[in-house]
Image: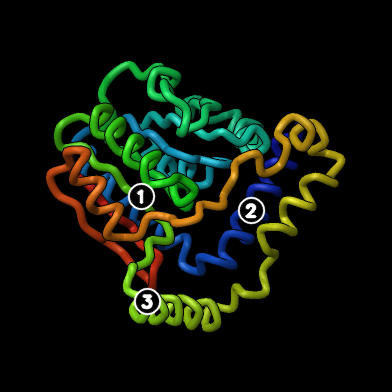
Amino acid sequence: MPTTTDARQWLERWDRQQERYIPDREERFAVIADVVEAAAERPNPLVLDLGAGPGSLSLRVLGRIPAAQLVAVDADAALLGLARAACHDRRSLRIVEHDLRAPGWPAALELCRPVDAIVSTTALHWLTEPELAAVYRECFRLLRPGGVLLNSDYLAEPAPALARLQQRVLDGRVARVGTAAHEDWATWWAALAEAPELADLATAGRPRPIDHDVPEPPTHPDHVRLLGAAGFAEVGTVWQVGPERVLVAIR
């Protein structure tokens, strides 16, 4: 397993790689923490991070709400290995390896009480519409009344002209911020596979075990519709740059 120092350096490299595609990623994280903090109604909320990857969002939430209890779930053994090594001193963060597409994932979390908030960032886009609908139904069941679900992701509009304009806004923001020169997704994964300090993770994790290619990913209206069908009382966007959104649903 990598040392804490090595893991944190790779986590930093992951964050910069992600900014190539999401130039305002830190602001997105801050908005999520704003909403969780405002909706928590207690100093030690129980927060579930879906598709947590190496733990970037979980760490941001803990930085804002130190007394929070975080449960981070993901199916990628390599990314979770980085999270465990980088965050081993965070006793309030519990990491669970499980595929959200597999039945029974809520039971694998071993939650002790209803959840105050469920968060996700750049993760649920690899679910098909039926899979996403099932996840949203489980989220509704896991949340306490008044709890919130926040999905921050690329949530485009189905109308083609509007979708093109949204992408142009995002491309313009990338150009102005200057993150287009950052390392890309494929290069990061290739480097992980070759890094000697991460040999155990690369072997055990099989980089990119999840199929990220969904033929028809759900659009923004699809997400809103599925959240409403799951039972959420209010659904709306609290932050947006082009197609990048923070979508909030209140139980």
Q: Secondary structure at mark 3?
A: helix
Whichever of callouts 3 and 1 sits on the residue coming sooner in the sequence is 1
Q: Position of residue 140 (x, y in %)?
A: 24, 34
- Residue 31, percent across and down? 34, 57
Front disc: 2 or 1: 1
Q: Residues within 10 Å of mark 2 (few under 14, many from 20)?
A: many
Q: Is residue 147 left or right of residue 216?
A: left
Q: Position of residue 99 (x, y in %)?
A: 51, 31
Quadrant of the snapshot with the C terminus: top left
User: 67 or 77, which is in the foreground?
Assistant: 77
SS at mark 1? strand
Q: Is residue 139 above or below residue 171?
A: above
Q: Is residue 75 visible?
A: yes
Q: Which of the marked residues, 2 or 1, is nearer the chain's N terminus? A: 2
Q: Is residue 178 left or right of residue 125?
A: right
| Residue with the mark numbered 2 | 14
Say which amino acid is labelled 2.
Trp
Which residue was labeled with disc 1?
Answer: 151
- Res 45 visible: no
Question: CA–CA distance between discs 3 and 1?
Answer: 23 Å
Callout 1, which amino acid? Asn
Residue annotated with mark 3 = 160
Q: Is residue 83 above or below residue 188?
A: above
The quadrant of the rendering that contains the N terminus is top right
Q: Nearer the viewer, mark 3 or mark 2?
A: 3
Question: Of label 3 and label 2, which has the lower sequence position?
Answer: 2
The residue tagged with tag 2: helix, strand or loop?
helix
Which residue is depicted at the point 31% across and 60% down? 220
Q: Residue furthest front?
A: 215
User: Residue 103: which quarter of the image?
Assistant: top left
Local packing at callout 1 (Cα closer than 10 Å; few below 14, some 14-19, many 20+) is many
